[in-house]
Amino acid sequence: FKGHIGAPVTACAAGIQAIGDAARIIRADEADIAVCGGTEACMNTVSLGGFAAARSLSTSFNHRPDQASRPFDMSRDGFVMGEGAGILVIEELSHALARGAEPLAEVVGYGTTADAHHVTSGPEDGDGARRAMEIAIAQAGISPREI
């Protein structure tokens, strides 16, 4: 466990930012393998109170909490706070094959942008998300139709 180290501070995007950073380091031949990901443990009265004051939390499903978390649903009305972690080991393809590993996936493109719009929501025109996807597609060397 020697080499690059990083701790992205990009709120709810920090874990995927760490994965993108690790993939970029591997693509630049600065490392063969990386442990990357993120964790979040923010369940406290200050965080909960802040998001409640910002009216960002789901409230329409209090009687059905198992149905409240629906980030991509048309009937969503906010988000549900939670805690968790996710860690990946990613490596350069030839490194994985040399040790007899069977690759499960390949990071072929990654894009990130800053919206500078609002603390809990992006602009309605989706410009930041569009730009991030265009960067990832360009890195991958594919067209949107190939996704």
Image (cartoon, rainbow, N blue to C red):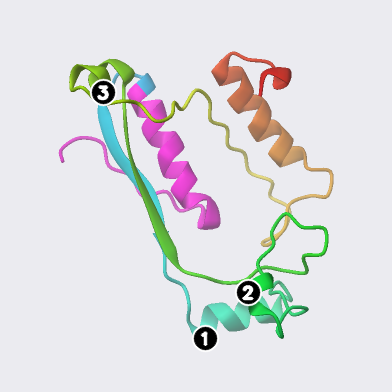
Q: Which residue is mark 3?
A: 96
**27 magenta-colored:** no
Position of 127 relative to 96 (above/below) = below
What is the quadrant of the N terminus in the image?
top left
Would residue 93 appear left or right of 116 to someone viewing this image? left
Which numbered disc covers residue 26? none
**24 magenta-colored:** yes
**Camera-side residue: 81 or 121?**
81
Q: Which residue is mark 2?
A: 66
Would residue 52 appear left or right of 60 to someone viewing this image? left
**Chain part drawn in magenta:** 1-26
Task: Tell which residue pokes out farthest to the left in this image.
Answer: 2
Q: What residue is drawn where x is 41% and y is 35%?
A: 21
Q: Is the C-beta separation of discs 1 and 2 under 8 Å?
A: no
* Structural crowding at the residue carrying mark 1, measured as other residues with C-alpha within 10 Å and reported as few (<14), some (14–19) or many (≥20): few
**Camera-side residue: 134 or 100?**
100
Q: Mark 2 or mark 3, which has the lower sequence index?
A: 2
Q: Which residue is mark 1?
A: 45
Hey, what amino acid is under mark 2? Asp
Hey, what amino acid is under mark 3? Ala
- How far apart, in angstroms, are the residues tagged by discs 1 and 2? 22 Å
Q: Of helix, strand and loop, which one carries label 3?
A: helix
Hey, what amino acid is under mark 1? Thr
Closer to viewer: mark 1 or mark 3:
3
Q: What residue is drawn where x is 38% and y is 20%?
A: 27
Where's residue 39, x and y in %? 39, 59
Q: Of helix, strand and loop, which one carries label 2?
A: helix
